[in-house]
Amino acid sequence: MAFVLTVVGLTVLTGLAGLGMVVQADRTDPLWLSVSGAGVALAFSGPVVLGSLAAWWQLRGSSDSGRYYRLWRNVATAGTVLGAALVVVAGLAMGVPIWLLLVIAVVALGLLIVAVPVGDRVRRSADAKGRVTDAFAPDTSDDTRRVIRRTALTFAITLVVVAAAWIPLTVMTGEEPNDLRLAMALSGFPFIAASLACSLSALRLNRRVREVTGQDFGRLRAIARVVLKGKDDELDELGQIAAARYAALAPATLGTQLGSVALLYVGLALNITSQALGGVIPSTIPLVMLAVLAIALAVVIPLQLRNIRRARNYAAEHRDLLSNR
């Protein structure tokens, strides 16, 4: 629920902020619209990242996790401040009332302040309900099949709903039934819904990873350096067992993450393309956004596949440690 609310909340906040600036602006310009959009997204993303990390990991449970927490906090703070500054500069250039710019900046900074306390509270509330399992089981096949089944079912159901809404929407919008822009806009929804279903269905897998790393973010990073990057970090006996267990689970969790990101980016690309065809946003903006999505996938896919291969190799080499309890 926290994940769903975060996605919906971020979308609503950025949408309202962007719409408010466009409506209140005395004049619009493609360049300043792009700057304001980037500023709004940057200003609200920092608090979301911090809050999400705090809702899942103990960020200050050890010296390593504390160091990583300070790094993430500084990056999120810098991003929020920079985003707020871009919003103010672009807003002033477009003649947006100063009160609206101050509201956007204050809301972003306020979210940054409460992100970690709220995330901590969510994590403690979830942890109070107990652990997922008492004994470690390296087999992830059932969980993986469950993720694939639910993702595919969500895609199919959403596709049916979209197909059923096709004709009514063409009547309401005055578009032709074969209008390419409307077709691309609607076809993006099944991919986005499937991405969300994939992330939520993988929750149990991710909880198992969190358990074997003791919920400590710093410990996770140390184990990931050993398993995925081949670093020669010294691990004690318990750390070696945790690394072997993490390696056994990582291919499934990394695979679901890759699937979720790929589905989301395809859905976003279809939506952005439909907006470009309809002239909803300046023509240069969707081209830049599509290029960013393509570059991100070109980087993420090979890296994630490499990490999956390394995790499998590590688990195979340390299979004897998986029998430890």
Image (tube, rainbow, N blue to C red):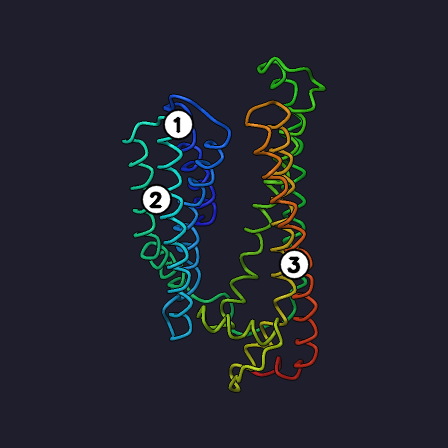
Is 50 left or right of 241, judged from the image as shown? left
Q: Position of residue 255 (x, y in %)?
A: 65, 58
**Residue drawn 35% across and 26% down?**
95
Disc 2 target residue: 108
How crowded pointer 2 is (Cα within 10 Å; few <14, some 14-19, many 20+) is rated as: many
Residue 2: give its label: none
Mark 1 or mark 2, whichever is nearer to me: 1
Q: How many marks?
A: 3
How far apart are labels 1 and 2 at the CA level? 21 Å
Above or below, comparing residue 312 to residue 72 in the picture = below
304 and 278: which is toward the camera: 278
Above or below, comparing residue 125 to residue 62 in the picture = above
67 and 154: which is toward the camera: 67
Amino acid type of the residue tagged 3 in the rendering: Gly
Disc 3 target residue: 255
Residue 94: give its label: 1
Q: Earlier in the sequence, mark 3 or mark 1?
A: 1
Q: Secondary structure at mark 1?
A: helix
Above or below, comparing residue 197 to residue 37 in the picture = below
**Residue drawn 53% across and 87% down?**
237
Amino acid type of the residue tagged 1 in the rendering: Met
Mark 3 or mark 1, whichever is nearer to me: 1
Mark 2 or mark 3, whichever is nearer to me: 2
Q: Position of residue 167 (x, y in %)?
A: 65, 18
